[in-house]
Image: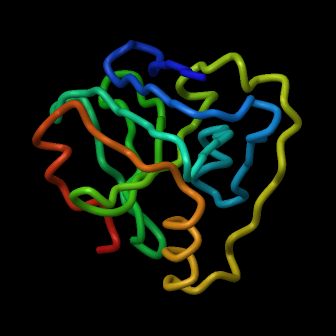
Amino acid sequence: MIHTGQCHCGKLKATFQTQKTPEALGVRTCQCAFCRAHGAVNISDPQGLTTIDCTTGNVQRYTFALRTADFLICRTCGVYIAAVMGEGEKIVSTINVVGLRMKAFFDIEEAPMDYSAETPAERIERRYAKWTPTRFQNPDLAASNFGPH
């Protein structure tokens, strides 16, 4: 299955490829202040692939708390679309289906997740195990390092 989405103004786009149905994937709501403030509802599939299409000038990379990932936010409309971690061929992400307006995931019951007890090492390990392999259309972003900082 291929799911596509974009931020409100359309400058940040993502394609999510998976063999699983939206119901089988489920959706998660992180309970941190950043995700709650953005109304984030996230998905990932370690056997899938996410492709992010945006220019360097249109995306704001925001890092906070443990500095283990970068959060991608549209500079124009302010929508958070993904959290990204890694570098080179080992970049992974979780994408915000609400921010990307991926309607196939809107009616799925959300699973609240609290990661506050994780150490930075545990958080990084979980993300590499559970987040989606990710590629960027923009060569400048593809060559970037996305946390940990």
Percent x, y for residue 33? 64, 57
88 vs 78, nearest the viewer: 88
Q: Which quadrant would the N terminus be assigned to in this image?
A: top right
* 18 vs 111: above or below: above
Classify residue 146 as left or right of residue 73: left
| Farthest right residue in view | 109
Classify residue 64 as left or right of residue 25: left
Classify residue 143 as left or right of residue 63: left
Q: Residue at horizontal 54%, vertical 21%? A: 2
Q: Quadrant of residue 40?
A: top right
141 vs 25, nearest the viewer: 25
Q: Residue at horizontal 11%, vertical 42%? A: 140
| Farthest top residue in view | 9
Percent x, y for residue 97? 61, 30
143 vs 81, nearest the viewer: 143
47 vs 97, nearest the viewer: 47
Q: Which quadrant would the C terminus be assigned to in this image?
A: bottom left
Q: Residue at horizontal 21%, vertical 58%? A: 88
Percent x, y for residue 96? 57, 37
* 105 vs 56: above or below: above
Percent x, y for residue 31? 72, 58
Classify residue 42 as left or right of residue 71: right
Q: Residue at horizontal 63%, vertical 28%? A: 98
Q: Quadrant of residue 114?
A: bottom right
Badge count = 0
Colour mode of the rendering: rainbow
* 145 vs 104: above or below: below
